[in-house]
Image (spheres, rainbow, N blue to C red):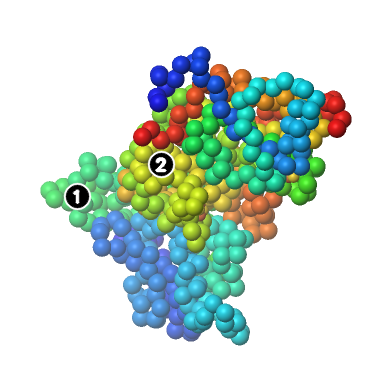
Amino acid sequence: MSTTNSTITEDIRAKAKQLLSSGEVAAFLGFTTGTLPMTMRPFVARRPEDAERLVWNSFCVMNLANYLPDLLKSVEPPRGPKDPPPEGPLPKVGVLATGCWSRNIVVQIQENQVQRDRLVILGIGSRGMVDRKKVLAQVDGREVWTSEEGEHSLVIEGPGFKKEIQRWDVVRDNCQTCIHPNPVIYDYQVGQPVSPREVKDRFRQVNEIEAMSSEERWSWFQEEISSCIRCYACRNACPLCYCPTCFVDDSRPQWVGKSIDLADTSIFHILRAYHCAGRCTDCGACESACPMGIHMRLFTKKLEKDVLELYGTEAGMDPDVPLPLTTYKEDDPQNFLITEAVGQTSEAGEGVKP
Amino acid sequence: MDKTSVQKKEWEPKIIAFLCNWCSYAGADLAGVSRFQYPPNIRVVRVPCSGRMSPNILLDALKAGADGVLVSGCHPGDCHYISGNLFARRRFAIFKSLIEFLGIEPGRLNFSWISAAEGEQFAKVVKEVTERVRALGPARRLVKEI
Ligand code: SF4
Ligand code: SF4
Ligand code: SF4
Ligand code: FES
């Protein structure tokens, strides 16, 4: 393990242990090593001795904010639907947060899914998480037995090969274009804040697609989603998707067909992306969770770009700035209206008065 | 039915128009009463406010085989529910841009503000939408081929 990661891991363990043994938090949410190489698994420590199992490295690709609403409910004293809320403050939960996760927590606070005073946030400046699909591509898809992370490189070992690769080459697309790696809210800082990266054009991928013709974009979209098996892992991994009943599970009306016909899959992807408009932090958890390697992040990245251009906001940067689709301005741009093309008759119209 | 078997000549675009009860619906009424001609291609669905329109419903129309969709509400400032159309305006701007980014032809989804007094404007908008959709041809992209 690199020294950066081991220092952070040690700090996390110490802090989690202290928070759990002092009883300040009822549970601590972090990561532990998964069962496969290059996978990390979200982990809830509930006893001080569990803290030893917490680990930090470059494969913590899931967004921990995703588990917070349920975890907070799980530590509340049990009560029936009609019982009054318990007296006194409810138990707290400790959680790790990088830049994007902390922004998702802000969005959840704004949407009343979590309460700030029930969270103890350990902020971590993120150096960017590694995309295991990119690593696998570097070793021609061969099986990987172990990965050993150095400061700026990874040593990958499998049957009959051992390869050193540059870490930055296999960092996820969203992390490579991230300009907010440090948490926006936290109670304690773990490790050093990272200096914001130089990103030439964070919307480059979106711009390239925008430059294509409508026909080409449709082919790109269809090609991109053609292998989707509709497992909804992308939805389940997303901290914005806490709806008790998702539109894909509605049967009356049935908004989207259940088959993997491309028309159905297209509607699923359009609506899932749209539901994230103005809320998505480009954390990349959806893309990391996808078993088929679909780049659905590009759809939400387009939304991020539009929201920034049209309304000048970015999701979760400031709890006091309302989410863009929950507010409006009198003079919001409206050049998408067809009336802009046919011309507007003067107010109150020239037609015959009724 | 596939694209090739649909003869351009006999094909007439089918356009679903979601009109706000308080303004555009009355505008359509006025267009009729005042005998302004407009193409018979629209099927009107009356909605309580343009703010009622969820993108689910717009996609549902395309999925069910509509060739185009028009949503029309009150002018900003005139919404019966004060701000329904102002919230809707943000939603429509974002949604239209998203689906066009994903390759749905521009012109399939159309939005306008038409007041109850703008019968002529209503006729003009319907003409324009019909022409645009006609030029695009039948919408098959979100229709399941069974
Ligand atoms: S895709 Fe939409 S409806 Fe489904 S859980 Fe996410 S936000 Fe809710
Ligand atoms: S849509 Fe994807 S990138 Fe956006 S917040 Fe959800 S999981 Fe993260
Ligand atoms: S995770 Fe991937 S395969 Fe599963 S529904 Fe989402 S895009 Fe489709
Ligand atoms: S009442 Fe007409 S748009 Fe709201």
Callout 1 environment at 10 Å: few (<14), some (14 to 19), or many (20+)?
Answer: some
Q: Residue at x 31, y 58 (%)?
A: A39
Q: Residue B127, percent across and down? A: 67, 22
| Mark 2–mark 1 CB contact (< 8 Å) | no
Q: Which residue is mark 1?
A: A143
Mark 2 Cβ inside 8 Å of ligand 3:
yes
Where disc 1 sits, the SS reads loop
Q: Check disc 2 and give the amino acid type.
A: Thr
Q: Label 1: chain? A: A
Place of residue A49 in the rendered image (x, y in percent of width and height, measured from the top left):
36, 80
Q: Residue at x 47, y 69 (%)?
A: A70
Q: Residue furthest left?
A: A160
Q: Give the numbered dot on residue B20.
A: none
Up/down of A323 relative to B125, above or below = below
**Taking B88 as reference, is A120 left or right?**
left
Return the x and y of residue B93 as percentages of the image width and height: 63, 38
Q: Find disc 2 in the rendering and name its residue.
A: A265
Q: Nearer the viewer, residue A348 or A119?
A: A348
In the image, A106: left or right of A338? left
Quadrant in which the N terminus of chain A appears: bottom left
Q: Is residue A350 left or right of residue A173?
A: right
